[in-house]
Each structure stands twice: as C-alpha cells, then as structure tokens.
Image (cartoon, coloured by chain):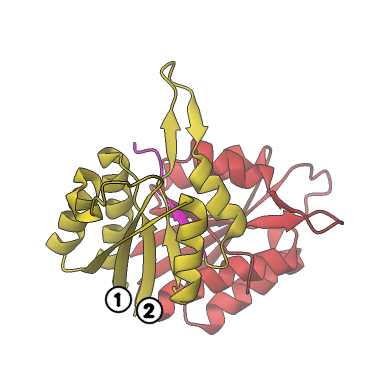
Chain colours: A yellow, B red
Amino acid sequence: MYEIVAGIGTNEERAIEQADLLVGLATSGLTTSVTLLHVFEDNPEGASAHQLESVKAARDRLADHGIEVDVRESSGDPAQNIVEFARERDGDAICVAGRKRTPSGKVLFGSVTQSVLLESDQPVFVPGIGK
Amino acid sequence: MYEIVAGIGTNEERAIEQADLLVGLATSGLTTSVTLLHVFEDNPEGASAHQLESVKAARDRLADHGIEVDVRESSGDPAQNIVEFARERDGDAICVAGRKRTPSGKVLFGSVTQSVLLESDQPVFVPGIGK
C-alpha cells in the first residue's frame, strides 16, 4: 500500500487536479491509500475539513474510483503541518496543489508547494496546470 | 501503462533518488514505462546519454526492478526539452531531481525543477531529500 498525504487547500479546482493525479496513478495499478489533510491557518469557529467544498470534491472523486480515502484537519502553518504529518505517518509521498495564476495570467508557484518541496523527506507530487 | 519521463542530470546521487521514487511506485503496483531523458546543454563532441554515470545508475536501478526503461538524449535548454518531450509523447508524468545543497548546507531548489513545475502540463514528481 502506497500512502499519500494530499494537502488540500480551499481552491476546489486545484483540489480536483490533485485528485485527478492520484486517480491516474490508481487506475494504472498503484495500490494507494490517500489522506486528505486540510490545515486551517486560523480556525476560531472550529470548522471541519469535511465542510470544505475543495475537500468534498477531492474525496468524492477518489472514492468514485475506489480509492481508500481519509480526511484529517489540523491548524497552523500549512506547509509545516503537511510535512510533519507525512513524516509522522511515514507516508510514501505528499501531493500538493500546483500553480496558481495572477489576475494577469502569470503562473506563480504556491508558497505552500515551494515550502513542502524544500522541507519534505518524501517525494512530492504536483499536478500539471492542465492541458 | 503509466508513462513517466524522467529528466536526468549529471548528478548520480540525485538520479538514484529519482529512480528510487519510480521504483517505489512500481513496487506498489504502478504499471509504468520510464524514459530517462538527458539534455546536453552543450555537446560538441556528440556524447551519448548512455555514457553518463547518472543515467547508467538510474537505468540499472529501474531495470533491476523489472521496470521498462528507455534512454533518450537531446540538447538545448533542459527544462524546455523535458517539458516538450513529455508533451509530445503525451506522457502521464515528469520526474525531476529535487533539491541541491549549497556548500553551507542550505537547501536550494534546482532551476530546472522550478521551470519544469511552472511549464509542465503533466504532473511533476520530485524526490524528497532523503531521510
């Protein structure tokens, strides 16, 4: 079983891109277990990751393809939480969202993605921007 | 068949990290075909990618695990060549080397990796720095 921790933000489109990456691996035979982790940077009302449209979209897409999926949440610094969570679970890989665009269309690297890439012990999977 | 294009540089240790990432996926069931692509930035003597220790190390490690592996070479801008090669072959993912360290030990992001992440249509897999 290949254990992947996917750090899911609040952007639904990017969460679906992450799920599609994982589905692509699974449909080519990877026996995978996925944990979707949302890190609340500030969560005074105690919201649940299950309430987020981005998390629900990714979870549903994975489950539709028969992938075992778990949803977790934490709060604090997103990149640090994702890396530490994956390290503690001895996960095989981390999946983070790829790029975002500025209003002018310029592609930018997400700061969470960049930090995860610099800090992770595990391989990091980043979706392409989509064809 | 999940087709991965791995851009292999000249650093043997990083090439092995890339191979290990791909072996990890294959041993968890991914049916994968790997093309190792080395891009010569300047190659007046017409060297072959097969001669590089980094390419040989990655190729041998993949073959030892029964992974179908092909070696290709091109010349020009590494990131651009890797992205275009993967796009033309309609590959499923790109694998690039992760980080390197400065002499003082600071982790840096490779410029090829960063460019591939920003330009790729396909998912990009980046090895962790190793535990």
> Furthest-left residue in view?
A64
Q: Which residue is mark 2?
A: B28
Q: Which residue is mark 1?
A: A31
What amino acid is at disc 2? Ser
Specify whether residue A125 is painted magenta. yes
Say if mark 2 contacts mark 1, CB within 8 Å. Answer: yes
Query: Can the viewer see residue B15?
Result: yes
Badge 2 local density, few (<14 within 10 Å), some, or many (20+)? Answer: some
Query: Can the viewer see residue B9?
Result: no
* Residue at position x 87%, y 56% in the image: B103
Q: Secondary structure at mark 2?
A: loop
Specify whether residue B96 is painted magenta. no
On whether disc 2 and disc 1 are found on a single subunit, the reply is no
Of A86 and B45, nearer the camera is A86
Which chain's residue wears label 2?
B
Q: Position of residue B25 (x, y in %)?
A: 43, 72
In this picture, which residue range is highlighted in magenta? A123-131
Q: Position of residue A113 (x, y in %)?
A: 50, 47
Q: Position of residue B88 (x, y in %)?
A: 44, 42
Of A59 and B68, nearer the camera is A59
